[in-house]
Image (tube, rainbow, N blue to C red):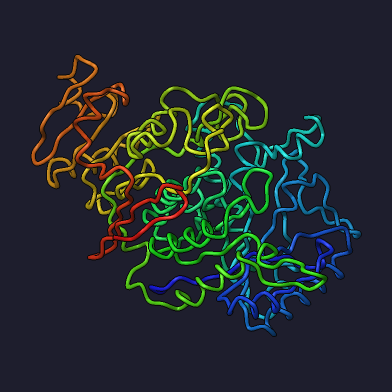
């Protein structure tokens, strides 16, 4: 990708939802776009008809000279999607439920050569919550996993199995004609597992999360595995649409631009127009989208996410814990969608690290408003105080760590190679590492007999601490965390410093 950000919006194909796709009208009213995300969800027609409809939609977009991403989410809500001539788009003989696109259908979508990527919408949601929308609709008579789970209580065995399954799934989609494969994440998990296996990280902005927390996690995956980075500026909040103001939408787009994101799009474009006396008129959402397009479309930033130089890092095994509680109302209290694997205290450490990084603006239990707890009733904010944070997984290499000044080691597992890389950064680069005793080097670990101890090592320091809420720790690392009420990020030689305004939804660059 270049040093500018491609801008688009999410729209619907009239063949699948009974709506008229009015891309040309929205594009005309909003001043043009670089791409659209168009829903191509399959239905009960025979395959010949479905392929013809897909070709018609692709041809219409080609007439508009707009490349597109083909989005699929219908399988997340519908247990049975079978064509009239017998192709099952979701269910498998082993009891699993995931999108299954035949080669002829993908080729029909891309007949004109303008398909950017296949997008599996909320893939991580379906994995960790076992297609919960289908389970709820059937009162849990059906509880289908996305991939076969392993009969194990080992987090690593299940995690490595899932990684292999995702890799095989992505490889097969590409073999059938997908030029690329992307996710679209509600929950801040599995970015690294997906990126490692060829899926483009694509984080939801605003929605129910802090945008910059999502960015820190997704950007870590993009940096570590050298992929593009996308974001969906989602106007949904819980069950409300639009659940965010048009101004918040504008600033989330602006944040994406400033953060070096390669592609950003708004979900969904039907919020841009209102019906007034029988005529569709562009409203404040459309006005603010058009304003952003006119200001930033094609504008060279001079950098993208691969130029990000984070200062504060978290290294952890991507175990899929984000703050799901023990109340079994909606979200499933398990890891990787495997009921045998329950979260332990180690899985929750990175949540506490984020609470430190964000000046206590995220909660002790989770990092998103999706979590069912009293603190989730607070007014949503898109932005939290943060100083150049990033999340890497358990296999990150030394060359990705050189800009870090502070790093937390968390979770159940980190590879010996990564721990050696961290040790190198401490000794040679002056990195300060906060770690539980179990991840400290043997020579350090053997000298620790208290809940908190700081040990110099070459140019850097090890802080061995079993309690991330320790006042002593908070005081010690405060100089690394930047100023309360500010966000600061460095890209190449350029520093982006943003003051968060009182509403938590907008900011001012200083």
Extreme residue in the top direction: 449
Q: Which residue is rendered at x = 32% and y = 24% of the image?
A: 469
- Residue 210, position in %: x, y? 47, 45
Tell which of 74 and 171 is nearer to you.
74
- Horizontal side, residue 466 vs residue 367: left or right: left
- Horizontal side, residue 86 vs residue 92: left or right: right
Q: Which residue is rendered at x = 79% and y = 47% of the image?
A: 78
Q: Is residue 220 above or below residue 64?
A: above
- Residue 69, position in %: x, y? 62, 67
Q: Is residue 192 visible?
A: no
Q: Is residue 370 above or below residue 492?
A: above
Extreme residue in the right direction: 84
Instruction: Give the quarter of the figure containing the N terminus.
Output: bottom left
Tell which of 345 and 51 is nearer to you.
345
Extreme residue in the left direction: 458
Q: Quadrant of residue 137?
A: top right
Q: Is residue 332 visible?
A: yes
Q: Quadrant of residue 124?
A: top right
Instruction: Give the quarter of the figure containing the C terminus.
Output: bottom left
Q: Is residue 96 above or below residue 285?
A: above
- Horizontal side, residue 498 vs residue 131: left or right: left
Count all numbered tags in the image, as a single digit. Answer: 0
Tell which of 2 and 416 is nearer to you.
2
Q: Quadrant of residue 12?
A: bottom right
- Residue 141, position in %: x, y? 81, 30
Q: Is residue 58 above or below residue 150?
A: below
- Residue 94, position in %: x, y? 74, 39
């Amino acid at each position: 990708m270049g040093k500018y950000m491609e801008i688009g919006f999410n729209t619907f194909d009239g063949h699948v939802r009974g709506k008229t796709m009015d891309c040309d009208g929205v594009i005309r009213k909003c001043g043009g776009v670089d791409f659209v995300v168009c829903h191509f969800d399959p239905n009960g027609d025979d395959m010949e008809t479905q392929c013809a409809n897909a070709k018609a939609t692709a041809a219409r977009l080609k007439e508009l000279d707009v490349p597109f991403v083909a989005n699929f989410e219908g399988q997340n809500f519908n247990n049975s999607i079978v064509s009239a001539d017998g192709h099952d788009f979701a269910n498998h003989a082993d009891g699993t439920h995931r999108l299954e696109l035949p080669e002829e259908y993908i080729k029909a979508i891309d007949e004109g050569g303008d398909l950017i990527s296949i997008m599996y919408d909320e893939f991580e949601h379906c994995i960790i919550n076992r297609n919960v929308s289908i389970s709820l609709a059937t009162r849990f008579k059906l509880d289908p996993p996305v991939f076969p789970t392993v009969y194990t209580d080992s987090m690593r065995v299940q995690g490595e199995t899932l990684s292999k399954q995702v890799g095989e799934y992505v490889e097969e989609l590409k073999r059938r004609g997908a030029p690329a494969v992307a996710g679209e994440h509600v929950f801040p998990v599995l970015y690294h597992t997906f990126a490692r296996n060829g899926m483009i990280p694509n984080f939801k902005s605003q929605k129910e999360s802090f945008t910059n927390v999502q960015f820190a996690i997704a950007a870590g995956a993009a940096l570590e595995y050298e992929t593009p980075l996308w974001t969906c500026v989602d106007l949904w909040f819980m069950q409300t649409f639009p659940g965010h103001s048009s101004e918040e939408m504008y600033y989330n787009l602006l944040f994406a631009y400033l953060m070096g994101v390669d592609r950003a799009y708004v979900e969904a474009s039907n919020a841009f127009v209102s019906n007034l006396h029988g005529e569709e008129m562009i409203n404040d959402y459309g006005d603010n989208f058009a304003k952003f397009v006119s200001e930033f479309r094609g504008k060279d930033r001079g950098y993208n996410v691969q130029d990000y130089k984070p200062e504060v890092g978290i290294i952890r095994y991507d175990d899929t814990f984000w703050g799901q509680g023990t109340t079994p109302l909606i979200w499933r209290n398990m890891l990787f969608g495997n009921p045998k694997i329950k979260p332990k205290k180690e899985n929750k450490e990175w949540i506490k690290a984020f609470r430190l990084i964000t000046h206590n603006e995220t909660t002790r239990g989770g990092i998103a408003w999706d979590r069912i707890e009293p603190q989730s009733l607070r007014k949503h904010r898109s932005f939290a105080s943060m100083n150049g944070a990033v999340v890497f997984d358990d296999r990150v290499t030394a060359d990705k760590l050189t800009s870090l000044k502070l790093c937390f080691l968390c979770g159940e597992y980190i590879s010996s190679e990564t721990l050696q890389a961290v040790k190198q950064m401490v000794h040679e680069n002056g990195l300060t590492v906060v770690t539980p005793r179990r991840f400290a080097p043997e020579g350090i670990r053997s000298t620790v007999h208290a809940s908190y101890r700081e040990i110099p090592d070459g140019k850097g320091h090890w802080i061995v601490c079993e309690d991330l809420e320790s006042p002593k720790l908070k005081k010690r690392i405060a100089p690394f965390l930047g100023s309360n009420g500010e966000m600061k990020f460095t890209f190449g030689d350029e520093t982006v410093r943003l003051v968060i305004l009182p509403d938590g939804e907008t900011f001012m660059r200083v």
